[in-house]
Each structure stands twice: as C-alpha cells, then as structure tokens.
Image: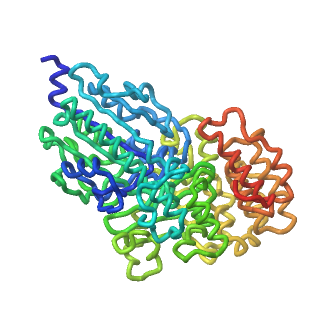
Amino acid sequence: MSTLSAQAADRPNILWITSEDNGIELGCYGDDYADTPNIDKLAEKGMRYNYCWSNAPVCAPARTTIISGMYPTSLGAQHMRSQQPMPQGMKMYPQYLREAGYYCTNNSKEDYNLEKPGQVWDDSSRKAHWKNRKDGQPFFAIFNHTVSHESQLRKRPHTAVHDPAKAPIPAYHPDIPESRQDWAQYYDKLTEMDEKVGQNLQELAEAGLMEDTIIFYYGDHGSGMPRHKRWPYNSGLHVPLVVHFPEKYKDLAPEEYTTGGASDRLVSFVDLAPTLLSLCGVKPPQEWQGHAFAGKFETEDQPYIFGFRGRMDERIDMVRSMRNERFMYIRHFYPHRPYGQFVHYMFQTPTTRKWYQMHLDGQLTDAQDLFWRTKPVEELYDLQADPDEINSLVDDPQYAETLKEMREVLGKKMQETRDVGIVPEAEMNQVCDGKSPYDLVRQGKLTGDYDRAIAAAFLATRATADEVTDEALVNALSDDQATVRYWATIFTLREGEQVVPEVRSHLLDRLDDSSSSVRVIAAETLATYGQEEDLARSLDVLVKAADLRQSDVYTAIAAWNSLDELGDKAASVRDRLAELPEQAKGTPGRMSSYIPRLKQKTLADLDGKPLP
C-alpha cells in the first residue's frame, strides 16, 4: 500500500453541505410547516445540534469566521464586505488540511473579508469536486447551495407551494399578505435546497463513500427575512447543524453522539475549523479562538456562544450578543441609531417595505414597532419562555444577577479577544494602512492603551449625563487616543442637549480633529444639538467628509450616514451633496454600491420622494 493510500485508510473524508440564509426551519428541528426530507433523513442517521450559532448574521463575516477559526472582531474583518490582511503567520484552515495530504475543494462561494495568504484551495469554483482528487487521497469538500438566499425568497412572480395562510408568523412581523407570501416562499426555497442536499448525498452513496465520509450540513446564518439576517438576535444567528459519523469513524464523534439524537452542546462557526482539523488528526493552532467539539483534540463544552454585528452594507452599527442554553444577552454600542436602519438590499423584500410603512402609519403593535425605534443599551431574553425575543428582562429584578453575569462575561470576552470593533472603521483602516488590525492592536499601535479604549466604549454607551462629570467628559474629548475621543463624542450625541451646551466649545474643537471619525460625529452632534450658528460649519465638515475626492470611502460612508440622519437639517447643502462623486479610485469593488445607495436615499428624503 502506498503512503498516500495508508493515510487515506486512517483519515476520514469530510463533506460539508452548506446552504444560504436559512435558520432551523427544518422538519428535523420540529418545524411542521417545513418539507425537508433529505436533511431530516440525515438527522435520523446522524445527530443535530440544538444550539449552533453562525457568530455573524450575514454571509461575509460568517464565512470569515469559519475560514479563519477566529472571531472577525479580532481581525478587523467584522464589517460587511471589508477586506483585511490575515495576521502574520496565520493560515486559513484548508491550508493546514492540504499540508496534511487532503484534497480540498470549495463549490463555490468564498466571500471572505480577509485576503487569502497564498493558495487556500486545490479548487474553488463551480466545477470543484471531490471526484478530482488523486487516487486514494482523502478529501475535504464543500458544496454550497444558494437557492434559499434572501434574493430568492422575494422573487416575483412565484406561486407558493407552501400555503401562505398556514405560514408561521413571528410576533415581531405584522400578519399581512406580504409577510405570509415571503415566509411561504422561503419555505418553498428550503424544499428546493433540501433536494440539492439529497443529490449531494446520493452522489456520495453511488460512489460507495458513505462509510468513509463524515458529513456536516449547516446553514450560514438566519433566514433572509428582516430581523433575521443582519441581526445578532437568536433569530439571525441560530442555524441548523447536522452531523453524521459512519461506524468506521465513531471514535472521532463527540461523546454525546447518538444516532438520531441531539446535542445540547453550545457550538458556533468559530469552532468549525478547529473541529475539522481535529477530525483529520491535525492539532488546531494555539492562536485560534474556537474550540474543537469532536475528533482527537476535542475540548470541553463552552458555557456561552457569541455573536456580533458590524457595518451592514452601507449602514454603520456595532452590536455584540451572547447566549447560553436559556438566556440571550445583547449589547448595543450605537443605541442612538434605530434597529431597522435603511439598508437598501434589505428593503427590496416586500415584508420590509410594508412593515416600515405600517410603522410610519402607526399601525403596528409594540412588539412589531420596536424594530423601527432607537435601541436600548442592553437586552436580555429568556429564549425558552420567549423564543421570538420580544419581552426584554433588563429591568426585571428577578434577572438582575443573570444580566450582571452576562454583561461581565461579554466584556471579558471582548477584552480577551481584543475586539477591534471599538475602533471606528475609518480610523482602523487609516492607522493600519494595509497591515493586520489583529497584529497592530497587540503591538499597541492601533489604539494605544486598549484597556482604556474599550472602557471608554462601554462607558460612553451606557452612562447617563448624570453619571459623567463635565470635567471627565472634557478630558475624554481631548484625550490623546483617537478612539477615546471618538467614544466621548458618541456620548455627547447620545445624551444630546443634556451635555452639549456644557461642552460645546470642545465639540467645536473636534470639528478640526486629526481623526476623521471624530470630526464626523462631532459635526452630527453640533448640527443636531448645537447653536444655530454651528449648523453651517458642521454641515461643511460633513460634506467634505462625504466627498470621495478628498476623503476615504470609510469616512465617506460615516459622513453620509450622519447626513441622512440629520434629515431636513441638511437641506441647505442638498445641491452640494448632489454633485458629490459616487466612486473613487481605490474603492474596494465589493463596496462600490454603498456610497451611491447612501446618496440616493439621502437625496430622496430631502426631495420628499419615496424610498428608493
């Protein structure tokens, strides 16, 4: 027997079947409305995970988590369609597998927010297939199905197969024809996706490889419906994960593995790469932040799993979340912005548009209207009693200890992983200038004193005006660290007229700040809460920041967000805005639509036109 054949005999093939934009709306997860026989059969002979999170509620950062074995918030890669270099010396997981002799294929979506450090896949294309490996070579293969993607559930015309009248409608969605049609069509697409999963499995069986192959099936984040995709609620992060271990490799299965059973272990996408290497007999790199939940290097169960939200397309945000088996905790760092910011792509779904119009018309229940309001700082939900996450327990004294514990755990996790989300995206890219944020923050070159910077982020977004002295705020506004100044300025925007009059002169100084991120927020604050004579100067700062001829794309995105938020206060610069360029040399191609969308929306509002 050749060396390669001997290795193949000792190591399993691994097949990952993935699908886009779907949560646990499957028969094997107890959904009676679903029609997913192939995945259900896989679960019957394998095991499903009851608590699997995608870490990110949208594709690019979710896939970034998987490919790196790291939290994108540590890599500066948490923002939708951003592009950061890998940290020095780190590899993507297929590179470790290829070094171990595996033939690695991806069919076919990548969509990483990281630059690939050399050749990652043997083949990553629509033709990629395990059949193309060398004779006797073990394989790792991904087949990704897009039929359930958000863009597909809203295509019209569509004749629903699932009866819209029977579609399950969550408490936060209005029960209207648009919601029922979109939900029914989503389930139709899940059935189509399930058929493709069946084809993958049949192909493996016909090749006689079922007993040599460990199979994973999972979705890449929650459904494409609004308040699922893009939101780090459980509804946006909870995904199906079904695994099958053939008898030959039962020794690699986790201890709780039972045929047709379910695991209550908390797992998430950051754990997939370590688990994969562990199954193949390769020790996961020490710097990886996930935990192997099967294989030779299986680790202990984790008490929590963590999620995040960064910039979603053209809209800036920062949310962190976590859960255990029962409770869900959410921490907002931009509570001055509404949940349902206008993301152009999201607003193409009929449910979203009608839902928003009903908000404007005052036709929603409190639970349905919440999505269109500004956010609280914290949310806490009992997922067993309240699976739709509509009754926050933050102010309930019965859960004070739970709230305190989860708040502290999240803070420690962010600190431990050096979450660079506290650094505004424009500032991060200006300072890093093509280097890895992961590396620079650990060298003290991105934020300076990281502990002081993250403390400023937590304080600025939770404290009230009564809890921060004028002296402390003035000191923070003039701090030598740009990140501290940024969060101090965010505090003034949050607290508005309660603090702006006392620190107005210092905010005026910030209009000339060396950090464009600080300038933008200072300008929005003064335009909103400053004196009448501050408006023209503040708008001038924002127009210049939005001008791609003299600004970078990340600063421009921030400026357009502020201008849109100002509404009619920006009317005097409407014509200047109309003349601003929508593209600039050096704008990443994956981000080329963001400035045009922001410009279109801002001008439509100023002109009194319908949403684009």
Q: Residue at x 61, y 64 (%)?
A: 354
Decide: is 142 above or below 147: above
The percent position of residue 286, horizontal first and vertical second, equals: 32, 41
Here the colouring is rainbow
The residue nearer to you, when weighing 31 against 386, is 31
In the image, 291: left or right of 226?
left
Image quadrant containing the N terminus: top left
In the image, 157: left or right of 305?
right
The residue nearer to you, when weighing 425 against 137, is 137
Whether residue 41 appears in this view of the structure is: yes
Decide: is 295 above or below 469: above
Decide: is 426 above or below 171: above
Q: Residue at x 21, y 42 (%)?
A: 295
Q: Residue furthest top?
A: 2
The percent position of residue 132, horizontal first and vertical second, equals: 31, 22
Residue 453: quadrant of the picture? bottom right
Total count of labels: 0
Residue 484: quadrant of the picture? bottom right
The percent position of residue 239, horizontal first and vertical second, equals: 37, 54
The residue nearer to you, when weighing 204 against 472, is 204
Whether residue 411 appears in this view of the structure is: no
In the image, 558: left or right of 72?
right
The percent position of residue 320, horizontal first and vertical second, equals: 48, 59
